[in-house]
Amino acid sequence: MGYPASVVRLIAAFKTLPGVGTRTAERLAFHLLKAPDDQASELAEALLAMRNNVVACSACNTISESDPCPICADDGRDRARILVVEQPRDVAAFEEAGWDGIYHVLLGHINPLE
C-alpha cells in the first residue's frame, strides 16, 4: 500500500524545489501532517501571500511588494552608483552592508564565455 494521493501530491510538489529529493520531501510532508493546524495553515498562507503580493521592480528587477521597490523609490539614494548583482538575495546582503547606491538585478549570472 502506498501513500494517500494527497500525500503523494505534496511529496511531488516538494521535490520540485531545488535541493529537495525524495527523502527530504517525505520528511517535510510527514512533518506537516503531524504539525498543528495553525502551523500548516500559516505555511500555506505565507506561500499564497508571497505569490500574490511579490512583484519584480520595473526599475531594478529585484523583488518587492511595490513597484518601484522601496530602494528605487528612495530619493536619498546615490543614483550615480549602480551595483549589478545576480539575485535579489544579493541586494539584501549589500543593504545590510550599507550600500547607498541603486541596483540592477540580473536574475542569473553572466557567462564570460558567451
Image (spheres, rainbow, N blue to C red):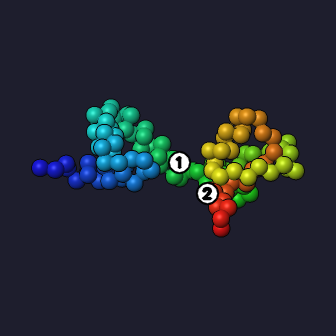
Picture quarter with the C terminus: bottom right
Q: Are marks 2 and 1 in contact (CB under 8 Å)?
A: no
Which residue matches tag 2? 108
Q: Mark 2: which amino acid?
A: Gly
| Residue mark closest to the camera, 2 vs 1 | 2
Q: Position of residue 14 (x, y in %)?
A: 37, 49
Element class at badge 1: helix
Query: Left or right of 2: which side holds 110?
Result: right
Q: Position of residue 58 (x, y in %)?
A: 70, 59
- Count residues near mark 2 (Cα–Cα under 10 Å), then give few for <14, some for 14-19, many for 20+: few
- Compared to 61, does 92 lie above or below? above
Q: Residue at x 73, y 52 (%)?
A: 84
Q: Mark 1: which amino acid?
A: Met
Q: Residue at x 42, y 40 (%)?
A: 43
Pick out the residue farthest to the top: 36
Q: Which numbered disc, 2 or 1, marks the residue that appears first in the sequence? A: 1
Pick out the residue farthest to the front: 113
Q: Position of residue 51 (x, y in %)?
A: 51, 52
Query: Left or right of 48: which side holds 75?
Result: right
- Count residues near mark 1 (Cα–Cα under 10 Å), then give few for <14, some for 14-19, many for 20+: few
Q: Position of residue 20 (x, y in %)?
A: 39, 47
Which residue matches tag 1? 50
Q: Residue at x 35, y 48 (%)?
A: 21
Pick out the residue farthest to the bottom: 114
Element class at badge 2: loop
Distance, label 2 to label 1, CA atoms, is 21 Å
Residue 82 in view, yes or no: yes
